[in-house]
Image (spheres, grey):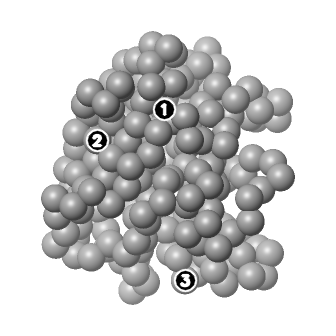
Amino acid sequence: MTELPKKITCIGRNYVEHINELGNAIPDSMVVFNKPPSSVTPELLSEHLGEALHYEGELCFVIKDNQAVKVGFALDLTKRSLQSELKAKGLPWERDKSFDGAIVVSDFVTIDSSDIADMSMQLFIDDELVQHGYTSHMLYPVATAITELSQWQKMDDGDWLLTGTPKGVGVVKAGQVFVGKVLINDKEIISVQWRAQ
C-alpha cells in the first residue's frame, strides 16, 4: 500500500455542480476538513458499523515544498445520513468523514505543476461513467488551495491534498466494481480498480 502521510487535508464543496446536487450553499471561503492517516484502507467498504457509505471520487495530490508533485485517484467515503444530521446541528464532520476505512487511494504518479491545469478525473461503476471533473472547474484550484492553506496550516512534505468531488456521488453497493482514472489532456495516466465489499 502507498506510504501514509502525516496528514490528509480535504477541500469540500469545490465543484459548483456537486454543491447544487446536495442542495448546499456556495461557500464564502474554502471549506476544509482533515482525515487521519488511519482512515486509509486498501479495501472499498460499502458500509461502516451498519451505515451505508457514499462514494466521492477525487484527485489526490502529494505535496512537497508547498507544491503538488504527485497525483492519485481517491474515493472519499461519507456517511451521508450522519453528515446531514451533523450539518443541521452545525457540528463538525469528523464522525461522517474520518472513520477507519473512509478513504481508498491509487498509487501516485509524478507530475509537473504545469500538468494540473489540464487534468481531469473519471469514475466508472460497473462500466458506467458516473463522475467526470476537470481541475479547471474547481472553485479553488490546487495552487490556490495550497496557498490559502499555508496561511494557517503547514503542509509537510508527503502530505496529501484531496481537492473535492464533482457531481455524481452516490451509494456504494457491495459487489460493484469501481474504476477511477486520472487524465492529462484527456490522456489516461492512472487507472485503479476496487470491488466494493
Q: Which residue is mark 1?
A: 61
Q: Which residue is mark 2?
A: 181
C-alpha gap between disc 1 and disc 2 = 14 Å
- Residue appearing at x 55%, y 61% in the figure: 18
Instruction: Name which of mark 1 and mark 2 comes first in the sequence.
Output: 1
Quadrant into which the C terminus falls: bottom left
Residue 41 visible in the snapshot: no
Res 126 quadrant in image: bottom left
Residue 161 visible in the snapshot: yes
Instruction: Name which of mark 3 and mark 2 comes first in the sequence.
Output: 3
Residue 81 drawn at (x, y percent): 55, 83
Q: Is residue 114 above or below residue 123?
A: above
Q: Are marks 3 and 2 in contact (CB under 8 Å)?
A: no
Residue 71 drawn at (x, y percent): 41, 30
Amino acid type, callout 3: Ser
Closer to viewer: mark 1 or mark 2 = 2
- Residue appearing at x 42%, y 63% in the figure: 168
Q: Nearer the viewer, residue 6 or 104?
A: 104
Looking at the image, residue 172 sits to the left or right of residue 192; the answer is: right
Q: Badge 2 local density, few (<14 within 10 Å), some, or many (20+)?
A: many
C-alpha gap between disc 3 and disc 2 = 27 Å
Looking at the image, residue 48 sits to the left or right of residue 141; the answer is: left
Look at the numbered disc 1 and give the secondary structure of its residue.
Answer: strand
Q: Which residue is mark 3?
A: 81
Amino acid type, callout 1: Phe
C-alpha gap between disc 1 and disc 3 = 28 Å
Q: Badge 1 local density, few (<14 within 10 Å), some, or many (20+)?
A: many
Residue 21 drawn at (x, y percent): 55, 69
Amino acid type, callout 2: Lys
Residue 135 drawn at (x, y percent): 51, 36
Q: Badge 3 local density, few (<14 within 10 Å), some, or many (20+)?
A: few
